[in-house]
Amino acid sequence: MRKFLVSVVVALSAVAVVAYAEVTSIRQDMMNVEKLAKQIKATVADASQNQQNAVNANQIALLMQANLQKFPEIIKQWPADQQPAVVQNYQEHINYALSIAVQMQTAFQNNDNATAAALIQQLFDAKENSHKIYNH
């Protein structure tokens, strides 16, 4: 029964991500990521906020997953023969942020605020590095 429920939750999450991906822009999603990340950063040391921070980290992961197949308009500025490599690099940045968010969710669930604090800083650093390429 437990496996069945997990399967249902995973399937519903996938459907929600697909539906969500169709109606939002990268900019909207990244603004939501920024808002959630700032909330986490402000409360990362407060263990009483771990449950909410785990939820917020999960939301960041879902937003990142929804953006794996969306690409910033700036990619069109690269020469056509370079665009596949640029898209691949963009997806690597998104996957890295997704990985950080999942690790951060786990850290909060395990009440490991020190790890979560390091991870939220990594997420902000990743944002800064990717914005140098894809958001100027």
Image (cartoon, rainbow, N blue to C red):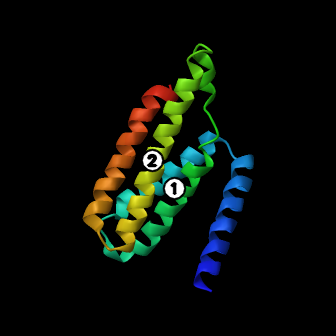
Q: Amino acid at mark 2?
A: Ala
SS class, disc 2: helix
Q: Nearer the viewer, mark 1 or mark 2?
A: 2
Q: Is residue 135 visible from the viewing direction of this image?
A: no
Q: Which residue is pictured at 60% across the width and 47% down the height?
A: 29
Q: Position of residue 103 (x, y in %)?
A: 39, 60
Using the image, determine if residue 32 lies above or below residue 130: below
6 vs 102, left or right, is: right
> Which is nearer the eye, 128 or 99?
99
Taking the image as drawn, is residue 131 in sight? yes
**Which label is found at residue 97?**
2
Mark 1 = which residue? 60
Mark 1–mark 2 contact, CB under 8 Å?
yes
> Which quadrant of the figure has residue 15?
bottom right
Residue that protrudes farthest toward the bottom in the picture: 1
Q: Identify the residue shown where x is 69% and y is 67%.
A: 12
